[in-house]
Image (cartoon, helix red, strand yellow):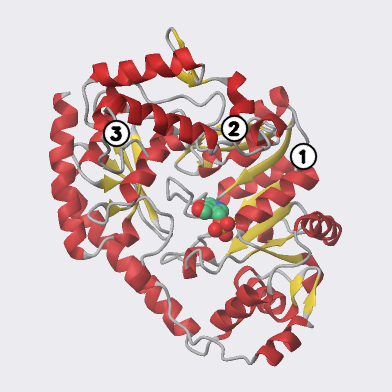
Amino acid sequence: MWELAEKKTTPIYQQIIEQVITYIQDGTLKPGDKLPAERKLAAFYQVNRSTVVHALDELVSLGWVLRRQGSGTIVNEGNWGRSTTPRVDWRSLFTQESHPNEPFLEKIQASLNDPSAMDLYSGELPLGLIPDFRFPSYTWEELLLEEKKQSPLGYRPLQQVICQRIKAEQKIDISSNQVLITSGAQQAMFLLLQVMLQSGDSVAIEDPSFLYSLPIFASAGVKLYGVEMDREGMRVDKLEQLILTKKIKLIILNPTFQNPTGSTMSKRRRNELIKLSQKYQLPIVEDEVFSELNFSAIPPSLKELAPYQVIHLGSLSKIFGSSIKIGWVVADQDLIQRLSEAKQMMDFSISIFPQVIAHTALTDPHFEKNQAALVAALKQRAQAFCEESQAIAADWNVSKIEGGIYVYLTWRHRHLTRKDWEIFLREKIVIAPAFLFSNDTMAMRVNYTRMTAEMRQQFFLKLQTISNELRRN
Ligand SMILES: Cc1ncc(COP(=O)(O)O)c(C=O)c1O
């Protein structure tokens, strides 16, 4: 944006003036927008700073921009009417404040655009591990006939397959009217928020938790409170203190292969949690998106332990990637009805396409075999990660991996700051530091499934170099 396209005979400072005025007139720059600092503009235009200062001085005297001590150069709000095309000032019409992205997340996104960076941040399996299946070959007419199998709760054949899978895995008998198909588990969470919570309500989550960085709660005015975890999962004594002091309305947790720690809540803790939730009549939302990626025995789901107390969320995006954006909520029939009504306010029904594909994927004759092969591959990668992590064991505590896609590494030495974590980006290792999930700055989440043997070797070598630097700092 800040470069001069063609060589003109007019002096450079005039070309800069013309460009800024054009940007203001065509709406690229809006009233109140801040221009880059003088030094940066000089670097962008590859000119002396004095040339930029000259251009800005002229723009100020013409009234296009304002210069304010301490806040730089800003497009003059008073010049709104000077735009050559009439336009609406959309920003003045927004009723809610936007929630700016965490600055580190923006740096992560930028790093992910670099093909030479190692992406251990994304919450998906690598392409090579995603189970393959044959795409359905429907004619348009056949698809329209499938459309007739849609109910307000979703595509009935998919609902039925999900019911069967839940029955088989969790030994709970559920019927189709207790299952709502959604566009992923996150949409399910959003719907629960709409139906069960209002501004000012409080929700208890694990600390750390991936929910900490989701803007949906803050924008609805819902307060999140993190509950400390130990080896067995969320601490029930701490949760009870919170229930007594903060009027908690809902408990949301990810008990199996938790995002970000990868840990699984013990059976004993699950039972204690349910007892507590029954004592205070609090519903629990159990987010179980990773439970199928298990290579060790996992405790019964909370839903299985207390079918009437627990709302269960599932998703296919952790197995098939986020292109199949299909998830589901299993809950009491009345709640499912309300959630469905809330969903219909946004979109009458989910498109038939991802639902037919999800159904095909789950009923593919090779699905069970492919799923077993996937789990075996994850187990192999997890074991190799643990063995090779011996090389960095003096600097990092490595969590045990029993399934799911994440491993959590905690720095053993002095306090790390947010700035320290930028070293990883500089070394092109993209991980998720703990401060994206809590106030902690001492740990990181790594998606170990994304590493081939060669990448693992490279990762541990780089991690040793980074650790040396962190210790020196
Ligand atoms: C624990 C957990 N729950 C839910 C989601 C969202 O799942 P979906 O892609 O189905 O919306 C994620 C995605 O990262 C997750 O990690």
Q: Name the secondary structure under disc 2.
A: loop
Outermost residue on the top side: it is 69
Three-letter code for the amino acid on which mark 2 is drawn: Ser
For marks 3 and 2, the one nearer the N-term is 2
Give residue 140's quadrant in the image: bottom right
Tag count = 3
Q: Which residue is mark 3?
A: 421
Give left or right: position of 107 versus 279: left
Residue 303 position within the rendered picture, expressed as x and y whole percent measured from the top left:
68, 58
Residue 333 in sight: yes
- The residue lying furthest to the front in this view is 9
Alpha carbon distance from label 1 to label 3: 35 Å
Residues tagged 1 and 2 counted as in contact (Cβ below 8 A): no
Q: Nearer the viewer, mark 1 or mark 2?
A: 2
Residue depicted at x 43% and y 7% = 69
| Category of crowding for the residue at label 1, using alpha-carbon neighbours closer than 10 angstroms: few (below 14), some (14–19), many (at least 20) | some
If the picture is divided into quarters, which one holds ligand 1? Answer: bottom right
The disc, 1 or 3, on the residue closer to the chain's N-terminal end is: 1
Q: Is residue 168 visible?
A: no
Q: Which mark is residue 197?
A: 1
> Residue 83: which disc?
2
Secondary-structure class at tag 1? loop
Dot 1 amino acid type: Leu
Residue 118 drawn above or below residue 282? below
Q: Quarter of the image holding residue 316?
A: bottom right
272 to the left or right of 323: right
Rendered residue at 74%/31% (across/down): 201
On whether ligand 1 comes within 8 Å of the CB at mark 3, the answer is no
**Foreground: disc 3 or disc 2:** 2
- The amino acid marked with disc number 3 is Trp
**Residue drawn where x is 54% and y is 20% of the image:** 76
